[in-house]
Amino acid sequence: MWESLTEFPDLGRSTLSTMKKAIDAGFKGFSRTYGEALENFFNPLLHFLVWFEKLLINTPWPIILLVIGALAWLGSRSWKVTGLSVLAFVVIGVFGMWEDTMATLAIISVATFLCILIGIPIGILMARSDRAQTMITPVLDVMQTIPSFVYLIPVVMLLGIGKVPGLIAVLIYAIPPIVRLTNLGIRLVDPDVLEAADAFGASPRQKLLGVQIPLALPNIFAGVNQTIMMSLSMVVIASMIGVRGLGVPVLRAVQNQYLALGMMNGLAIVALAIIFDRISQSYGKRLQAYRGQGRD
Amino acid sequence: MTEPKIQIKHLYKIFGKTPEKVLPLVRDEGMGKDELLEKTNHVLGVNDVSLDIWPKQIQVVMGLSGSGKSTLIRHINRLIEPTGGEVIIDGEDVLAMNQTQLRELRRNKMSMVFQKFALLPHRTIRENVGYGLEIQGVGEDEIARRAQHWIDRVGLTGYEDHYPGHLSGGMQQRVGLARGLATDADILLMDEAFSALDPLIRFDMQSILLELQNELHKTIVFITHDLDEALRLGDNIAILRDGAMVQQGDAQDIVLHPADDYIRDFIKDINRAKVIQLRALAKPLEPGETPPEVPHFPANTRLEDALLPMSQAPGQEVLVDGTDGALLGRASLSDAIRALHE
Ligand SMILES: Nc1ncnc2c1ncn2[C@@H]1O[C@H](COP(=O)(O)OP(=O)(O)OP(=O)(O)O)[C@@H](O)[C@H]1O
Ligand SMILES: [Mg+2]
């Protein structure tokens, strides 16, 4: 009697195992049939990623430092942030992590670019339709909470080990914030201002491009910032499925208990995160300069 | 015979889940706002309002908070869809228009000024004033030129490159007014445009509006809950209560012949000498009677300006001339005092 309550009446070992086997076999079949087509589909992306990585690695380091400095200055308009960014890269170089850092930079840049490209339109769609919002929100929740290793399995089964599956893993994890914040930003636009645009006869397109997106920009930008941070945090996991960069030595350090190696590369990732965060945050603040002081 | 610029005919607006279903209760059975809310959980916004608005006039719409003023004015540019009734502008049925025609109407024929200004915070004053022109697709140089003209007209020269958030409320509403005027639309819709401003600034804005109107002759629909503002600006005044029209007429009509206690309550504190004109007092002379030797005054002279001369005139009365110069009759000081104390 008591036993029947402590043991949950499950489907039974054999049923469950046939079920799992069937699902696996089905997916394997799917991947055998479509895997190649998918790989071909992602080929241009792979080429671009490889090209961009090579570009960063083959460019002379002084030029890279110059570009980093220029971007930091354009984003933050602060000598302190600019100086510290360049210094961080110099230190990274001195400690022999230049090439890995460039590889990481490449995948982060491409991932962020793709997140913006895919995420903003989805966010706009969600803002315009309540139905889209109710349908997409749970998907975003799953993408953010499901352990990365779980979705790595099907991705690797389909596309094997390499840069593209790594990139996809990063995208799945990093895209939700930009979608959410685009949606939120547009929904938070003052309805009075939108009514004024309507009263002057603005078309839906004129409203979107002239009012909603510009006013949502600070929020959208906060989303970009978070997306960058989240893709950086995926660097180590992505390196498990063949993405080059700072994650690879970290992984090696974990497997072999190399304390110094792990710390150094880990700190380099942190440095990148802080630099991107400061630059994009102060850029985001400058986007709101018109908001004035004290009045609204 | 001029046509009304805007005709509103038997307009109904009901807010709620199934407005069409409960419309007959209001239209045919005469159910009021409170009863409708209690029995059907629908809010009666506008209840059988008909109003002709004449070209080149300022039509004021008045009423307490929640009486349906904003709802009514938003039917004119169809920011709100009616539950029943008609809106006709320059002979065209606004409700029959498709989205494209409606946008053309909003772009070219009318513009709007809002209570909370509703400026675009991310655009400079110049870009805000030029917004309507940009929507119309006017070229950049022309936008800059026309925006500058209106910025100068409302007294904001020098603030072109500021952002709205950096200006005071009064200045922001000047921007709102300039934005409304810049498209050269015939019709200007103003929803409590000055209500958020301090009394002194509000008076200034009214003066600016009257001065501009003297020259531009637009058709203005001006919403307010302030009677002094209504009397100062309105060529015609319509008064709403619970979404229904209670009375319409010019200021003097309303002050001298209030339709009911609601309106009597509204007008009890106003300075009647500022509103009542000699026209209302003029008593025609007996046939064959020779006019007395007293000063003549135009019919639209307000009592505040006429009382002193009347008291000094022989027999304490004056003669009143109509707009065409013909003699309307005589007006006596005792009649004037009676009119002030009714
Ligand atoms: N979108 C809406 N949904 C439901 N009820 C509404 C809506 N808009 C207005 N109402 C109701 O319609 C009535 C008229 O509102 P309206 O805003 O037109 O009044 P108003 O005269 O402009 O008042 P105020 O002076 O406060 O601006 C009110 O009872 C209001 O609650
Ligand atoms: Mg209102």
Image (tube, coloured by chain):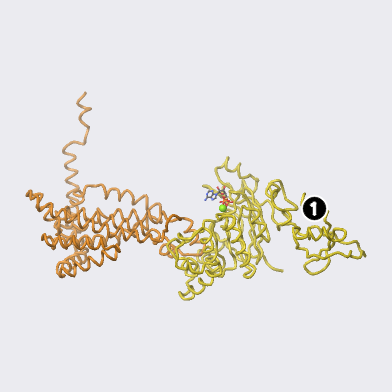
Farthest front residue? B312
Residue at the image position 68 percent from the left and 67 percent from the top: B3
Residue at the image position 46 percent from the left and 67 percent from the top: B127
Q: Is residue A106 visible?
A: no
Q: Position of residue B302 (x, y in %)?
A: 75, 60
Farthest top residue? A1
Q: Is mark 1 within 8 Å of ligand 1?
A: no
The front one of B185 and A270 is A270
Which type of secondary structure does the marked residue at label 1 adopt? helix
- Above or below: residue A45 compared with residue B140: above
Left or right placement of residue A189 versus residue A3 in this view: right
Q: Position of residue B114 (x, y in %)?
A: 54, 58
Labels in figure, total: 1
Snapshot quadrant of residue A65: bottom left
Left or right placement of residue A35 versus residue A214 in this view: left
The front one of B126 and B53 is B126
Q: Which residue is mark 1?
A: B337
Snapshot quadrant of residue B223: bottom right
Judge the density around disc 1: few (<14), some (14-19), many (≥20) Cα neighbours within 10 Å. few
| Residue type, label 1 | Ile
Q: Position of residue A265 (x, y in %)?
A: 14, 55
Q: In the rendering, what colour is chain B?
A: yellow
User: Which chain has been coloured orange in this picture?
Assistant: A
Q: Position of residue B147 (x, y in %)?
A: 50, 71
